[in-house]
Amino acid sequence: MFGPAEGPAYITVPGAGPDGMVIVLNLGTGATTTISTNPDRSGGTSDVAISGSNVYFANQTGGSVSVLPLNGTTITSVKVDLGARALAIDTKDNLRRS
């Protein structure tokens, strides 16, 4: 059985445009906001993963992973090989892969 919903849910919209639009849904209130997760404007965001205090977004076309602190507003971008469409986090070894 699950308890009451809390916190945000991050929903990627890959076809929304080059700035990587993500819908942030407040699970408690149902309110939504949108954020741009690809500061390079090189393609949509295709996946999201949360680990620790960060949210990671895969920017497939742009060959980057964007990082957003859970309680922050500044998004940074890390270059990776082209085609990063999915993310995985190894919590045992604390590794992040795209």
Image (tube, rainbow, N blue to C red):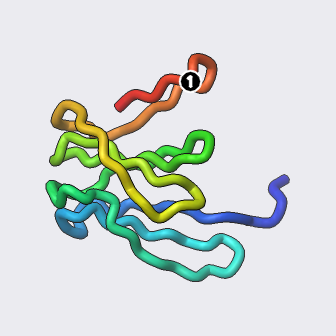
Q: Residue at x 68, y 81 (%)?
A: 29
**Residue 41 image offset from top left, x and y in percent:** 17, 60
> For the residue marked with disc 1, what is the amino acid?
Asn
Circle 1: element type: loop
Q: How many marks?
A: 1
**Residue 27 image offset from top left, x and y in percent:** 65, 70
- Answer with left or right where residue 45 lies relative to residue 10: left
**Residue 53 image offset from top left, x and y in percent:** 60, 46
Q: Residue furthest top?
A: 93
**Residue 91 image offset from top left, x and y in percent:** 60, 26
Q: Residue at x 19, y 40 (%)?
A: 63
Picture quadrant of residue 45: bottom left
Asked if 35 appears above or below 59 in the picture, the reply is below
- Within-10-Å neighbours for mark 1: few <14, some 14–19, many 20+: few
Q: Residue at x 24, y 33 (%)?
A: 80
Q: Nearer the viewer, residue 31 or 65?
A: 65
- Answer with left or right where residue 28 lies relative to residue 87: right
Picture quadrant of residue 16: bottom left
Q: Nearer the viewer, residue 13 or 35?
A: 35
- Answer with left or right where residue 89 lies relative to residue 3: left
Which residue has dot 1 on it? 94
Asked if 53 appears above or below 25 in the picture, the reply is above
Q: Residue at x 49, y 44 (%)?
A: 49
Picture quadrant of residue 71: bottom right
In which quadrant is the C terminus drawn?
Answer: top left
Q: Nearer the viewer, residue 45 or 68?
A: 68
